Amino acid sequence: MTADPVVDDLDSSRAEVLDSFFLPQLTAPELGGLTWVTRRVDGGGGAVLLRSPVLTPDVVELVCDRLLAAQAAVLADRPVMDIAEVVGRAVARWYDPDHPGRRLAERLLPQITGYAPDMVRRGLKDHLKTFRADRLLRFLAADFDNPLVLDGFQPNRAGGRSRAFGPRLTTQVFAGNVPGLPAWNIICALLVKSATLGKSASGEPLFPVLLARSLAEEDPDLGRCLAVAPWPGGAADVEAAAFARSDAVTVTGGQAAVQSVTARVPTGVPVIAYGHKVSFAVVGREALALNRYPDTARRVARDVSQYDQQGCLSPHVVFVERDGGVDPQTFSAALAGEMARFEVTRPRARLGLADSAAIEQVRAQYEFRSYDDAAGVALFASDGTTAWTVVHEERPAAFTLSPLNRVVRVHPVSDVAELEPLLAPVRRYLQTAGVACAPERLTGWAEVLGRCGVDRICAVGQMPDPAAGWHHDGRGSLAALVRWVDIEGAAELTMESYDPEWTRPGAASGTRNGREGL
Amino acid sequence: MTADPGAAATGLLRDELDLRLQALIERAPEPGGPDARAQDAEFGRLALELFAFQYEHNVSYRRFCRVRGAEPGRLGDWTQIPPVPLTAFKELPLAVQPPAEAAAVFLTSGSTDPARRGRNHHPHLHLYDASLRANFAASFLPDLDRIRLLVLNPPPATQPHSSIAYFFGRLVDFFGAPGSDFFVDDHGVQVSALTAALREAETAQVPVALLGTSFAYVHVLDALAQEGLAFQLPEGSRLLDTGGFKGRSREVSPEGLRAAFGERLGIPDARCTNYYGMTEISTQYYESGLGGAGPRPKTVPPWARVRIVDPVTRLPVPDGQPGLVVHYDLANRGSCLAVLSEDTGYLVPDGDPTSAGPRPFVLLGRASGSEARGCSIAVDEFLTAVRGAHR
């Protein structure tokens, strides 16, 4: 994926130029006074020219101030259920195949990212289902016993009352590896009544802008609380201006991005970091029954292939139990067959030199190991291309990461407990475990996997689609953003002693505390 | 390894083919000269003969070739010899003789995975020596027989499995004038000894040649900057460096490094040469000619060829297009003459497509695999993090 910045690109006359920003806070004359850049983005599907203003610290200050003003005026006191309903309606617009934003996304995202059009179409649809009005209630329910704590003080279990205040403004650094991902960040912030200043990713800068536009179309007030624009990653002066005006910062990205942002956010401003994560699948012997294993293989193939394994939800490794209806190597072969089928309808993005070379290196390594029959290694790989690779390896030395782009290792195991030593070195990075096993074993497996560091357990075939309300990377997506204010129970009682009835001249004088006052 | 590993292994594989290979190497390189076409033909003949030998004696390589339908006698020319990926040197015993009989085994530094290091077996080092000797004389020291060599690397005896240490050691043997020495030990660069040697050369007006890895030079330059020292080495002094900064804490551009060489050592840009070598092959490539602006191409000597290929199809890419560097090195007798590197580069476009002889190439860097994107993880970054956690 390349993004070569060009100003006044000569090709502009031939390709359409799209606005890759959403800044309703700025008037047309204000925007007109800024410097503009046109970037050519080409993920291998054809170039798209994206136009955006260059954000300077002054402009960011102005945008932040107006975001804060809008948040105070139209969001801070808006009932949470009202917000959920509006967001739900805006998202529902995208269910219409003719919705202009959706059509634009379906046409341009494959060009920008190189992902297969069918994969983007299906992926976006599945992803946006997560934010249907009814599912938004699950986000709220997952993190709050009583979501009305976002509107006012509500009784708490400690005998007092609590209210959850979201940030007034959250600066959010979006990821670009998987289209649609920023919806999670934008919507979670809105649900806790926070305005968002979003930094779009160079790899996929378009979707958050389109989503913000549909939210604004549904409710212009909400739109005024959103700003999305690109700026160079780590631009210290721009980000300093943004961080100084934010109550919270979220960053989704690699280690370097997370560390860089975390180091520069002022003390006291929480940073919610969604850093590097690794996922895997575990296939139990029940899912290897003769009447089940082809379907299991198809599901795992989808988990591996969706978004070319670029997401943190994508499995790097599949552990397969021995003693099923088919042996693990037969399953590896079946998985390879299903990977090949997926490739036919949703071909993998074209790769650059380095990514292709990385896959070839892994293939060569395992080809050589397979020369030794005792090594227990078999290699299944697409012929003449790097489209997909399945490495069957009986005795892995360690949990080894995939070079991505549809390369997966399969390791046989006799029991899920065998995973513990393999997962121990990577526990800080573990995220999703896709599983397939008999129902009575699910809890036991979840105990083991949870202990190993996993924070999401789902069925194989559903790894790319986390359910609404998932504790993203082990934290509440909303809870991580809010600041609690507690009114202590004893305070409520003590305040009784200041009831004007008792403090009027001539009131009963023996009252020393609220309890007696009652 | 003994003091003279070449001599110690005399007898092993010193057959007629070996002598012809050595003769080709020792013939004075005349790239583009009148006999370039004849040299091309001889290179092709010898390459196919060496391939047949390696196919026969290297069991792992034979299996690799059979999978690809490549057998001696069925190949039309040397470009059809299947290059082995670097990982083969880690995974397989890739030797034409029992590894125990090798005169030298050079190990890769293991910069990406210390657990698995590549091994290149050399039944003898006659061809290795002939290659380094011919190349150094032609590319770095055409004007002198000997020069005082100041080596910023440990002496070879302390690193018997390092091809770089062997290389620098042999250069001292063949080309070192009195006063040549090694300035790195277990404790790092011996800065005070080195500065004394530089001072002496400066005072006595004796030209010197510094040899070392880019990384060692950075250390030295830092130390000199810290001490506020700068030298004006006498006319004819020169400098050879190699390598990049894989996995190191600091990166310096080649231009930045050369500027610093001028500033701290008084060695002009034109006298600073970078070479590219790998443990898995037996030939080095030196930067050609005087550098102008932009990247400096590397020259390929007559006993080697470099092709630039697509990583997937393994077919050559057009001149000027980046691809993976494939080496065909006739000095690499003990393992495989054709090696697919993990480095990227491009062939310098040539106005005349029919011209004969090896073509220069520009080295771009290492194809290090997937970049970190979004919340997914890049392998290298992850390995670094995991290692950090267990340190």
Image (cartoon, helix red, strand yellow):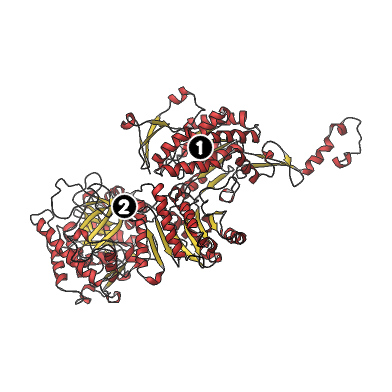
Residue B209 pos. (x, y %): 23, 58
The vertical placement of A131 against B17, above or below, is: above
In this view, the residue farthest toward the top is A29
Q: Nearer the viewer, residue B25 or B213?
A: B25
Residue A333 pos. (x, y %): 42, 61
Disc assigned to residue B365: 2
Q: Nearer the viewer, residue A56 or B365?
A: B365
Q: Nearer the viewer, residue B276 or A404?
A: A404
Q: Label 2 is placed on what type of residue?
A: Gly
Q: Residue at x 91, y 39 (%)?
A: A510
Residue B169 pos. (x, y %): 25, 67
> Which of pointers 1 and 2 indicates the residue nearer the eye?
1
Q: Secondary structure at mark 2?
A: strand
Residue beneath disc 1: A198
Quadrant in which the N terminus of chain B is drawn: bottom left
Q: Nearer the viewer, residue B242 or B385?
A: B385
Locate residue B155 relative to residue A331 in the image: left or right.
Answer: left
Residue B6 pos. (x, y %): 21, 73
Dot 2: chain letter: B
